[in-house]
Every structure is written in C-alpha cells, then in structure tokens.
C-alpha cells in the first residue's frame, strides 16, 4: 500500500471509469453523469474503459474532456488474442472445476464466497482451455440432465456458450493501470472492475444509478427471443455477479436510499454503503425564462425514444389530456434512432389516436431551448435511477408528473428530513389515466402549478448541486486511497 500511495502523490490521481454500453456513444442519465463528473473534476485524470456488445465503429455523442487521458475499449462478443496468461496445471484445473460444480449446484443462493479460493486462477490464468476440457463438458452435461433433460441439448449448449463467452472475455482482459477503479454497474463492468483492482492493487468503487440485476431481470422476463426455461438461469447469473461485485468493492454508492434495500438483499455490507445524489449546474436552468401562460398547455418529455421510457404510456395519456384541454401539445425531446422499431410503433400510435397535430417528436435537441416553452415535465419510464431530467426541470421552474420508479418520488416529494413540499405528482408505472388527471389538474389550478415551481427550485438549490456531488466523489477517491 505504501508504494501505491507514493505513486498517487507523485503522478496525480488516475481514475478508471468502467462503463457498459453507455458513455461516450449513448446519451442518457449515466452518460450525462459521467460527462459532468469528469468535466468538473479537472484536477483528476480519467481513463474511460468502455465495454460494448460487439466490435463496431460508433459516433461519439460527447465532447471528451481534456482530463480524459485514454479511452480503452473491448467487446463482450469479440474473439480477441488476449495478452498471454499463465497455464493451468492439473491441480488448478481440478480446483477450478470443483468450484464451478459447487456454484452450479447453489447458484440460486448466490454463494460467491466459493470464488475467493480461486481468485488467482480467475484473473491470472488462461481459462479458455478449461471450457474445452472433458471435465467442463461433464459439468455441463450433468447440469443439463438434472435441470433440463426434456429440452434440446443443442439449444442448451448454445445458451451456455452465450453465458460463458462474455464472462470469459471480462476475466481475460487486462485494462489500463489506474489508481482507483470506478464501475457504474455491477454486471460485466463489475467483473472488469474486480479484475483491474486485482491486477493493479487498486481499490474499486461501485456506483449504481439503477440496480443492475433488477433491470436485467426485467429485460429477461420480457424477452421474446429467450425460451422461458432459460430465463431463471440468466436471472440467477446476474444476481450472482452483483453479489460478487458487492463483496469485492471497497465502497458502494447509490443515488437514493431505497436502492440500498435491493443491495442488502444480495448481501451488500451496510458499512460499505453511501448515498451520493446526482447534481446539476443549477444556474444554467434558473436563468431560463419561465412560461406563465398556459394556452397552449405544453408538456415535455426529455429522453430517448426507447421502450424503457414507455413513450406509449405518454401517448395514451396525451389522448386523454387532449380530450380535456383543446390547446394542448406534447413535445418528445430526444433521439429516436436507438430502437427504430419502437419509434415506428409510437408513430403509428400517434396516428391511431389522431394526435398528429398534438404530439411532436423533436429528435435530439438542446433542452435549454425547450424548457422555457414548457408548462410541465412528464416522465413515464418503467425503470430509472435518479433522473437528471427531473432535477433540470425543477431548476427550470417546471412541475413534474412522473411514474414511481427509482428515486423519482424522493426528488418530487422530498426526503424524510426536509419540509419543502411537493414539486409535482407521482403515479404508478403504466397508469396513463392518473398521469392525465394530474396534468389536467396542473392546467386548471395555477396556484398548485406555481407552488410546485417554487418548491422544486428550492429543493434543487439546497440538495442537488453539481458542486456538492463532485466534492463527495472527490473526497471518496481520496478516502479509498
């Protein structure tokens, strides 16, 4: 540890931010948080470690800050000539396979302690020959006979390959040396973070905006491409990985207290846990003009047009609001190319509901140009962390109607220790009727609309400043060293 501290003092602090499928190629909450963190913490050097699904050229969506010294990339599905590692001897192969046998038999209980005995094997040895060995084949066939004997073995084999290859790539990769590794999810990024911390004798910080294994579980349950019988295997895998990342992380932060409930369910130690809320540059939004007139009544949605944002709920809501408010507009402000089929379905729904003159997809825009045109913000997501867009909207003087996901309720109603008052309304996911009812109430009651504006502005100014967030993370980096 002494040599490690000396290196930090002499060369300055280098943080390796590990991101899975987000920054710098996809916009959104995590990417916005990443850009803010790096651009405001100028005295710290950053290495971006980006994990993609497959090798491909992609367009940068952000202006990379000057203190980002390297962007390192690899893909989960790549066939890469990894740096040569140690070869396993017979005893090490036996130990590894015995541990895997135990994990296969108890995976549903997430007993990650079994991995502690083989950490060196996991991160220092070439594991590729193992998956071609007779012992590994016997393990797979044994699990098949016990768990899925009536299913196609070919389908089972390729599903297992789909599980194994990405994990193997995460274990084999050697990422750039940093003083601190900071992963923004558990999952594959968490495995890479553990590996980097192991190889370079560095601490690992985990920050969860949303709870990764719960988000993956929701996606897996809804997936039409995956047979039902394999869904529990994938769900248990991501829970197992999350628990291992919780165990190996030095400190674990999240954006709001309710997230910690799900972390402790998988054995996260409370002594590691911290809450660091998102923050925004309030002045950029407080200086914007406010829209007091309400005809037309303009409601905005800010975010990607993707299924997790449940744009279809917003369109159903818009149909009801339009029936009550003749001069009503819904602006959907965000990129539309990420899920093209879903966007097309939304466009068709606009036609079905006869909303062509009411709903406007603006594409990617500068939100600072649009907040002054709006009377309220609508958020209909089925999953969120702590949306920056709600903080921005409140700082811009907009009341919010949001689904009760992630930290949205705490942003709008406040935490237990403050008495500012509500900045909007919360509705259950999918409940477009309640969302419509509350938007209509905001239109009809100017007093409520303006009071929500005042409350939102005050809450953001007191609790959700970028400067506060940056100071907390900077102190965290120094603390773990």
Image (cartoon, rainbow, N blue to C red):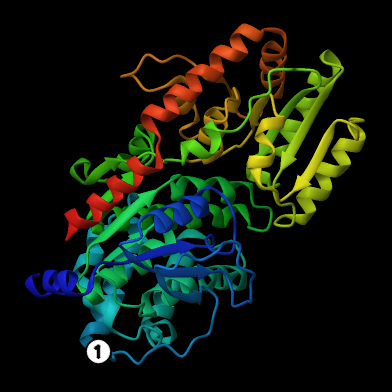
At horizontal 61% and vertical 52% (from top left) the residue drawn is 228
Circle 1 residues within 10 Å: few <14, some 14–19, many ≥20: few
Instruction: Locate the C terminus by quadrant.
Output: bottom left
Q: Quadrant of residue 427?
A: top right
Q: Is residue 40 left or right of residue 246?
A: right
Q: Quadrant of residue 12?
A: bottom left
Residue 73 position in % (x across, y down): 48, 75
Residue 69 in view: yes
Q: Secondary structure at mark 1?
A: helix
Residue 185 in view: no
Closer-to-camera residue (291/129): 291
Residue 9 position in % (x across, y down): 15, 69
At horizontal 41% and vertical 64% (from top left) the residue drawn is 18
Tell which residue pokes out farthest to the left in this image. 2
Count of all numbered marks drawn on residues in the image? 1
Closer-to-camera residue (13/136): 13
Residue 187 position in % (x across, y down): 42, 59
Residue 205 position in % (x across, y down): 29, 56
Instruction: Locate the N terminus by quadrant.
Output: bottom left
At horizontal 45% and vertical 52% (from top left) the residue drawn is 36
Kindly identify which residue carries mark 1: 90
Q: Is residue 442 left or right of residue 150?
A: right
Residue 186's place in the image compared with 154, above or below, is above
């Amino acid at each position: 540890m002494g040599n490690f501290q000396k290196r930090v003092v002499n060369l300055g602090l280098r943080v390796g931010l590990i991101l899975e499928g987000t920054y710098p190629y996809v916009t959104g909450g995590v990417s916005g948080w990443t850009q803010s963190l790096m651009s405001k913490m100028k005295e710290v050097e950053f290495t971006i470690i980006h994990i993609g699904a497959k090798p491909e050229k992609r367009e940068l969506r952000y202006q990379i800050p000057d203190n980002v010294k390297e962007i390192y990339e690899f893909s989960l599905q790549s066939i890469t000539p990894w740096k040569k590692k140690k070869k396993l001897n017979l005893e090490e192969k036996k130990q590894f396979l015995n541990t895997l046998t135990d994990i296969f038999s108890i995976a549903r209980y997430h007993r990650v302690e079994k991995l502690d005995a083989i950490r060196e094997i996991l991160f220092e040895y070439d594991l590729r020959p193992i998956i071609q060995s007779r012992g590994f084949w016997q393990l797979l066939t044994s699990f098949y006979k016990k768990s899925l004997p009536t299913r196609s073995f070919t389908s089972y084999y390729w599903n297992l390959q789909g599980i194994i290859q990405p994990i193997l790539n995460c274990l084999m990769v050697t990422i750039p040396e940093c003083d601190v590794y900071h992963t923004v999810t558990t999952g594959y990024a968490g495995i890479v973070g553990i590996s980097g911390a192991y190889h370079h004798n560095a601490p690992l910080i985990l920050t969860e905006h949303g709870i990764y294994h719960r988000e993956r579980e929701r996606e897996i349950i809804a997936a039409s491409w995956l047979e039902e019988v394999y869904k529990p295997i994938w769900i248990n895998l991501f829970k197992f990985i999350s628990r291992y990342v919780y165990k190996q992380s030095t400190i674990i932060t999240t954006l709001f207290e309710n997230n910690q409930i799900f972390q402790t369910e998988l054995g996260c130690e409370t002594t590691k846990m911290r809450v660091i809320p998102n923050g925004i540059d309030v002045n950029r939004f407080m200086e914007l003009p406010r829209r007091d007139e309400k005809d037309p009544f303009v409601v905005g949605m800010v975010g990607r047009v993707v299924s997790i944002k449940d744009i279809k709920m917003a369109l159903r809501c818009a149909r009801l609001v339009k029936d009550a408010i003749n001069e009503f507009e819904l602006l959907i402000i965000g990129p539309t190319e990420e899920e093209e089929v879903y966007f097309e379905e939304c466009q068709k729904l606009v036609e079905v509901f006869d909303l062509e003159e009411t709903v406007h997809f603006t594409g990617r825009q500068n939100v600072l140009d649009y907040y002054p045109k709006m009377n309220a913000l609508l958020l209909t997501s089925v999953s969120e962390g702590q949306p920056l867009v709600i903080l921005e909207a409140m700082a811009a003087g907009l009341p919010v109607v949001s689904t009760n996901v992630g930290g949205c309720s705490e942003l709008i109603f406040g935490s237990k220790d403050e008495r500012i008052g509500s900045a909007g309304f919360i509705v259950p996911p999918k409940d477009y009727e309640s969302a419509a009812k509350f938007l209509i109430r905001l239109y009809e009651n100017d007093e409520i609309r303006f009071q929500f504006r005042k409350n939102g502005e005050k809450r953001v100014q007191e609790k959700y400043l970028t400067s506060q967030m940056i100071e907390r993370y900077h102190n965290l980096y120094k603390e773990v060293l």
